[in-house]
Amino acid sequence: MRTIAYNDIVKAIRDTIIYSTTHLSEDMLKALQEALQKEESPVSRAVLEQLLENAQLAAKETKPLCQDTGLAIFFVKVGEDVKIEGGSLKSAIYEGTQKGYEEGYLRASTCDCFTRQNLKDKVGYNLPPIIYFDIVPGDKLEIEFAAKGGGSENGSRATMLAPAQGIPGIRAFVKEVVSNAGPNVCPPIVVGIGIGGSFDMAAVMSKHALFRDIGSSNPDPELDKLEKEIQEELNKLGIGAMGMGGTQTVLAVHIETYQPGRMCHIASLPVAVNIQCHSSRHAHITL
Amino acid sequence: MAEYKLQTPLSDEDVSKLKAGDIVYLSGTLYTARDAAHKRLVELIEKGEKLPFELQGAVIYYVGPTPPKPGEVIGSAGPTTSYRMDSYAPTLIEHGLKGMIGKGKRNEAVKEACKKYKAVYFGAVGGAGALLAKRIKEAEVIAYPELGPEAVRRLVVEDFPVVVVNDTYGNDLYEEGRKEWAKE
C-alpha cells in the first residue's frame, strides 16, 4: 500500500489549474503555428497571429489565456494500492479546484441551472467540478484536468445512429455538428468523437478524446486513417479561424471507442462529438 | 477590406461607412453586458425606466472578465458567444445601441435590426483574453454588482481591435468568408 497525503493532492491540483489556464500547451502552440503556415486566408492568418501573441502574453504575465476558465473537468485513475491520508480524494479535488480558481484569479463560472445564480458563495468558487473516477491496478494516482469553456461545449452534440448508417453516418453527423457550430465554438478546433459504448459513455469518451496530444496517432490504424479523412473533409467547409473564412478550421480529430473490442449494443451506434476551442487547456498529473 | 479608427459613442454616419470584413480600432467607452444584464436592461426599457448608461450611440461588449489581480485594471477579457443576447439585442438597437462586440453568429432579427436602425455587430477574437485586456485602460462596475462576472461595467478602451461581422447593409462576414474558402 502506498500512501499519498491529502495536502499534496490539493497542492498539485491547485498548481496545475493555475499553470494550465495561463500557459498554452506545447502541442497546441505547435498546432497553431502549423495552421498559420498553412492558412491561405488573410483574415484567418491575422486571427492566428493574435492567438499566438495572446499565448505569449498570458504566459509572461500568468494571466488567463481566455476569460472563460471553464468548468473544472477531471478524469481520475486511482491505483488499487493507493491510500489517501488526511482526507478523502473527492474533497482534495474540490479543495484544489477552489484554491486554483480563487488564488489564480480565474473566473467562477458555475451557476444554478434554473436561477442562474453563481454558486461561488453557496457551494464554492467554481465548484463543483465534474469528476470521472476509475479504479486501476497499481500504486499511482493519475489525474487529468481540463478547463472546459462553455462556448465550445454548447456546440457539442450526441446521437444514436442506426447500425446500418455505419461510418458514412458517423462522418455525416460530425460534419453537420461542426458546420452548424461554425464560428461560435472558437475555431480552429479539436474534434473529440466518442463512438460506441452507451448513450452516456459515447459523450464521456468524446470528452476524454480531447486529452490526447495533438499530432499523435490513434493506436487503431483504421481509426487513425478515419481521423485524418474526417479532418480533411471538415477543413473543406471554409469556416476558418474564428469563423471568418479560411482553410484551417480543424487542428485534429480524435476518436475514442469503448474497449475492449470497440463495443456497443447490437441494436445501436452511439456517436458523440465534443468540440474543443483553440484555447485547449489540458494537463496530466501523476502522483 | 478597409481599416478605421473610431471613437465611441458611434453615430449613424460612423456605422454606415462600415462593411463586413472591415477592421476597426475602437477607442472611448464600451459597456459590458451578458444575458442576465440584457434581460434587466430590456425590462427597464419595457417599463419606460432609465437605463444605467446612455444607450444612444453606445457600444456593448459581450464579456465576463476574470477577476483582476491586485494592480490590474481588469483580468482576461475576450468576447463571449453572442447568440445568447439575440432575443434582447433588437430592442436595444431600436433604442439607440449602435454597436455590439462578441463572437459567433447572430439571428435574422438582429441582422434586420442592424439594417433598419443602423447598427453594426463586431467580432473580437475569442480566446485572446489576455491580449484584449491590454487595450482596456479603465474598468468600473456601474450596475448589478451581484451578477459578479456578468455585472455591467463601464470600460475605457484604446484601439480595441474588432472586425465588422454584420453591417448596416445586411452583409455577413461569416457567410461570405465561408463561401469564399469552402471547397465542395
Image (tube, coloured by chain):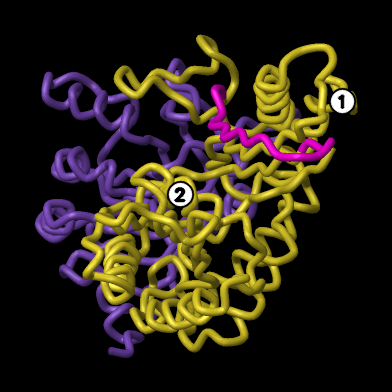
Chain colours: A yellow, B purple
Mark 2 is surrounded, within 10 Å at the Cα level, by few (under 14), some (14 to 19) or many (20 or more) other residues, namely many
Magenta span covers which residues?
A: A127-141
Q: In the rendering, at what x and y percent does residue A212 appear?
A: 63, 60
Q: Is residue B132 magenta?
A: no
User: Which residue lies at the image location 53% right of the left edge and 44% below the top edge?
Assistant: A148
- Most foreground residue, A118 or B69: A118
Q: Chain of mark 2?
A: B
Q: In the rendering, at what x and y percent does residue A8 appear?
A: 86, 26
Q: Is residue B40 left or right of residue B9?
A: left
Report the number of discs. 2
Q: Is residue A136 magenta?
A: yes
User: Which residue lies at the image location 43% right of the left edge and 29% below the top edge?
Assistant: B150
Mark 1 is surrounded, within 10 Å at the Cα level, by few (under 14), some (14 to 19) or many (20 or more) other residues, namely some
Checking the image for residue B79, the label placed there is 2
Mark 1 lies on residue: A4
Name above or below for residue A55 compared with residue A115: below
Q: In the rendering, at what x and y percent does residue A41 appear?
A: 46, 85
Kind of residue at disc 2? Pro
- Most foreground residue, A244 or A278: A278
Q: Nearer the viewer, mark 2 or mark 1?
A: 1
The image quarter containing residue B73 is top right
Checking the image for residue A167, the label placed there is none
> Is residue A67 visible to the viewer in this orientation of the structure?
yes
The image quarter containing residue A251 is bottom right
Residue positioned most to the right: A2
Name above or below for residue B122 compared with residue B85: below
Q: For the N terminus of chain A, give its image quadrant.
A: top right
